[in-house]
Amino acid sequence: MNHHFSKMSIPVNAHLFLKDPVSSELGIKIINGSILLISQLGFEKFTFKKLAEEIETTEASIYRYFESKQKVILYLINWYWSCISFRIYMSTQNVLDPEDRLLKCIHILTAIPDPENEFVLDNELELKQLVINESSKVFLTKNVDDENKLGVFSEYKKVVEFVSSIILEINPKYPFPNMLVSTIMEGSNQQRFFAAHLPRLTNINQKDDLVESFFTDTLLKAIKNEK
Amino acid sequence: MNHHFSKMSIPVNAHLFLKDPVSSELGIKIINGSILLISQLGFEKFTFKKLAEEIETTEASIYRYFESKQKVILYLINWYWSCISFRIYMSTQNVLDPEDRLLKCIHILTAIPDPENEFVLDNELELKQLVINESSKVFLTKNVDDENKLGVFSEYKKVVEFVSSIILEINPKYPFPNMLVSTIMEGSNQQRFFAAHLPRLTNINQKDDLVESFFTDTLLKAIKNEK
DNA sequence: TTTATTTGATAGTAATACTATTATATTTGC
DNA sequence: GCAAATATAATAGTATTACTATCAAATAAA
């Protein structure tokens, strides 16, 4: 199942663009070109000049959509988290047992979705890879506080709080729900990066993907048992 | 207890500098100036020109010690992990019970050390803050693989493997020791960043520092219980 | 005190991250 | 169908960055 980027109304914070890129052909080309080039070059070496060449337009035209390359990557990451949020909503809606709901969330947060069997939006897999490789850089700047004021991270926070509330439903006395969830969300991406580049930091082998099992195991033990 | 940077023989990978900065006055000024400026400006806005102004030398002179600003920050982070490694070695040496040893490690990895009561090297606290704010950016580049080949991350890996081996001593069947340790090492820094800038992602309040308790709790539950 | 070695001063370059201006298409409203 | 609005392209320009190169002056080692 594949759904079109432009057709899905995944909301993205309007402070991130000057002109809504999904509103025009060129805008869509900017988005798709950015995903491609950031993945290829890494965010540091990604420039609007190279992007302009790639999609056959000019730097000046791109600047009419996005104020800076930081805003572009923030836009993409924002879109990705909106997308995760949407998937979590879809897959927990009709699930009564909170533990089942929690497992669905952990799956969405930690696994690489399988387009054969799962609902996957267009561009979602490429974006996940981009988030794994680049997203921390965007958090860890002197601008976080300003960007946070603009609501750039609210989608992310909503996910954390939604999953945390399920944890509290299961164990109302668990003292660290948000820390646990944000650790899992960031940790699972980090472990995938380590698996690819610094495998001695992980226990991941070629055969099976242990990321989801590890975090599921850790989470369930953490919230269930009293010390 | 405070010990001098230059006097301690904390080893740093020799591929990271052109000329050993601890071997000269200017070299030490480059290190200390870098710590200061990277903390103030963030790594992105840190430049050798600004550093040269700060420590009253020239860009060209700095380039005789370090090939690039990336190498400088890698040097600092490398030094930090050497330092952690040294502290872990010191504080576990004479501890027989593996669980006690593990708790000491987790303390060193997750807590902000207290210079009143603990052995703390000169610059260590500033460097810890720098690692919290900047270190992920240095991992997450297209150069990781090359840097990894030069052994830049070996100190980090050694810590992971040392702590993992204690976990396996306690529970030889635990399947994810390295993942657990690296998640804790990165996660604790990340949680401190979140606490300072995106507090809704954590459960940290002003009064007490929950980072160590959270990770200790999670770790002990993870390795002790069978599902 | 000669000779290395280290540092300083200065210059230069290609690339980056923009801003500004003007011209040319394209769309839309009437 | 045409003027008016809007979107895009083409081009130029700027300050800063991340270096490299050269040469002279200061300092330390033999």
Image: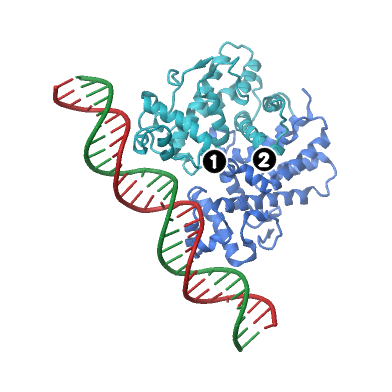
Chain colours: A blue, B cyan, C red, D green
Quarter of the rendering containing residue B69: top left
Task: Using the rendered image of the protein, determine whether residue A209 is visible from the camera's viewpoint.
Answer: no
Host chain of mark 1: A
On whether disc 1 and disc 2 are found on a single subunit, the reply is: yes
Relative image position of residue A174 (x, y in whole percent) = 79, 30
Check disc 2 and give the amino acid type.
Met
Relative image position of residue B29 (x, y in whole percent) = 41, 28
The circle on residue B110 is none
Image depth: mark 1 or mark 2 in front: 2
Q: Quadrant of the N terminus of chain B?
A: top right
Could you say which is closer to the camera, residue A137 or residue A214? A137
User: Which of the two labelled residues, at mark 1 and mark 2, occupies the earlier sequence position?
Assistant: 2
* Residue at the disc numbered 2: A185
Please say if B164 is above or below B2: below
Could you say which is closer to the camera, residue A4 or residue B42? B42
Relative image position of residue A29 (x, y in whole percent) = 57, 63
Q: Are marks 1 and 2 in contact (CB under 8 Å)?
A: no
* Residue at the disc numbered 1: A196
Secondary structure, mark 2, is helix
Q: Dot 1, crowdedness within 10 Å: few (<14), some or many (≥20)? A: few
Please say if A221 is above or below A164: above
Secondary structure, mark 1, is helix
Check disc 1 and give the amino acid type.
Ala
Host chain of mark 2: A
Residue under the image location 46 percent in, 21 percent down: B5
Residue under the image location 59 percent in, 36 percent down: A204
Quarter of the rendering containing residue A163: top right
Please say if B38 is above or below A43: above
